[in-house]
Amino acid sequence: PPCGLLLDARFRAGFALLAKYGLSFDAWLYHPQLPELLDLARAFPEQPIVIDHLGGLLRFAPYHLRQQEEEAAWRQSLQALAACPNVFIKLGGLGMKSFGFGYGKMPAPPGSEQLARDWKPLLDICIDAFGPTRCMFESNFPVDKQSFSYSAMWNAFKRYAAGASAAEKTALFSGTATAFYLLQPVAGPES
């Protein structure tokens, strides 16, 4: 996409139609684009927006050369976006090469303990900014399959959330997504 897409008048004219049809917006972008998303969220304060993949933090060349500065900019952008009550965030996609963990270069895929430990600092920043009721764990499979297994990912999320309250776990694993996407929960076999 061209630079400045979220600021483009034609894009915004189309974006304005989402409300007419009761639709939400998933924003898959990289962290240098988060200020544009902030401008969009402020211009459309009633439009539900969810940021995919922790806001696309880039931690590979050339960004790894200035990792502290880039992560500080990412954190500041997320905090500003969190001040917009219409913005939510998805926690996942951490197996992509852009996050710079290097899992694809390991002799064996990492287990859930390592994943939970590696991801904790980034997940903490997101949850501290947005709170559990505006955060949702997500799968980015099959893309993340290059780095770890599906079960290792979900077990890492479980390990990470082990100390959370029952209400926080419900929000992170299902409640936030159910509310954001206006889903109707399916009755289980006990019902």
Image: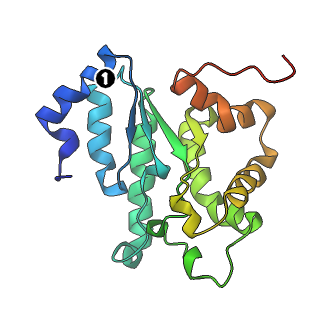
Q: Residue at x 32, y 18 (%)?
A: 19
Describe the element under mark 1 as helix, strand or loop: helix
Q: Foreground residue, 170 or 36?
A: 170
User: Would you place residue 85 above or below residue 111 in this image?
Assistant: above
Relative image position of residue 151 (x, y in whole percent): 72, 57
Q: Is residue 13 left or right of 19 when viewed as pictured?
A: left
Q: Amino acid at mark 1?
A: Leu
Residue with the most extreme right position: 190
Residue 56 pos. (x, y %): 42, 56
Q: Residue 35, relative to residue 185: is it above or below?
A: below
Which residue corresponds to the image point at 68% horizontal and 38% vertical from the top-left?
A: 173
Q: Is residue 143 left or right of residue 171?
A: left
Against 144, residue 42 (above or below) is: above
Q: Position of residue 137 (x, y in %)?
A: 61, 44
Residue lying furthest left: 9
Q: Tell me the quarter of the image containing the C terminus.
A: top right
Q: Residues within 10 Å of mark 1 (few under 14, many from 20)?
A: some
Q: Which residue is tagged 1?
A: 18
Q: Position of residue 97 (x, y in %)?
A: 47, 70
In depth, the one of 133 and 141 nearer the eye is 141
- Residue located at (43% from left, 27% from top): 86
Q: Residue furthest front?
A: 189
